[in-house]
């Protein structure tokens, strides 16, 4: 079993900071059109479950981006903070905000069928199409 890892980070302006525990030093990437429109590129996230604690919550704006997901950003500087599953509160924090990414490894890419051809990653990862991801994570009726 992998030991948990404590992480911390903050937005660009420092109005919002966070601490969390993640199961491992892994991160994933989403190539969907919403993520790319949200941040002008793929969203790189560290899955933290429900362990994330934010300071400066009054500066967080949450946007309901789908039936089952929502995105948080700093209303002061606009930094993308997290993606969260509404049903269970599972949160993926933006990897770019983490203070120390030493030793982290990309292990998965989702919505690989939505990835444009103008960029690519050399890492060999698990790859899921958008439909495969929805089948795994979307709430069941």
Image: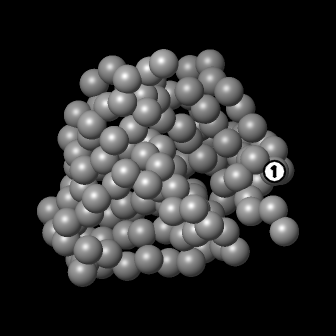
Q: Which of 119 and 60 is in front in this view?
A: 60
Graded by Cα atoms within 10 Å as few (under 14), some (14 to 19) or many (20 or more), the crowding at tag 1 reads: few
Left or right of residue 67, residue 102 in this image: left
In the rendered image, residue 51, in percent from the top left (x then y), is placed at: 37, 51
Q: Which of 87 and 78 is in front in this view?
A: 87
Q: Which residue is drawn at 21% across and 59% down?
A: 17
Q: In this view, does 20 lie above or below 84?
A: above
In the rendered image, residue 31, in percent from the top left (x then y), is placed at: 63, 48
Residue 25 visible in the current orientation: no
Q: Which residue is drawn at 43% across and 59% down?
A: 82
Q: Which residue is drawn at 74% across and 59% down?
A: 138
Residue 70 visible in the current orientation: yes
> Which residue ends up furthest to the left in the rendered image?
14
Question: What is the quadrant of residue 61 in the picture?
Answer: bottom left
Left or right of residue 104, residue 83 in this image: right
In the rendered image, residue 90, in percent from the top left (x then y), is placed at: 52, 56
Left or right of residue 101, residue 25 in this image: right
Question: Which residue position holds label 1?
Answer: 135
Question: What is the quadrant of residue 66 in the picture?
Answer: bottom right
Q: Is residue 107 above or below residue 118?
A: above
Left or right of residue 62, residue 18 in this image: left
On-image quarter of the C terminus: bottom right
Q: Which of 99 and 20 is in front in this view?
A: 20
How was this image coloured? Answer: one colour
Q: Residue at x 77, y 54 (%)?
A: 134
Element assignment for label 1: helix
């Amino acid at each position: 079993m992998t030991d948990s890892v404590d992480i911390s980070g903050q937005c660009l302006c420092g109005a919002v900071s966070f601490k969390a525990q993640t199961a491992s030093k892994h991160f994933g990437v989403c190539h969907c059109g919403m993520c790319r429109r949200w941040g002008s590129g793929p969203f790189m996230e560290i899955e933290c479950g429900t362990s994330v604690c934010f300071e400066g919550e009054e500066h967080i704006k949450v946007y309901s981006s789908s039936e089952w997901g929502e995105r948080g950003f700093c209303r002061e500087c606009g930094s993308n903070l997290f993606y969260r599953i509404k049903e269970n509160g599972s949160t993926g924090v933006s990897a770019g905000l983490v203070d120390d990414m030493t030793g982290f490894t990309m292990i998965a890419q989702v919505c690989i069928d939505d990835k444009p051809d103008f960029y690519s990653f050399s890492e060999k990862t698990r790859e899921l199409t958008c439909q495969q991801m929805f089948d795994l994570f979307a709430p069941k009726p």
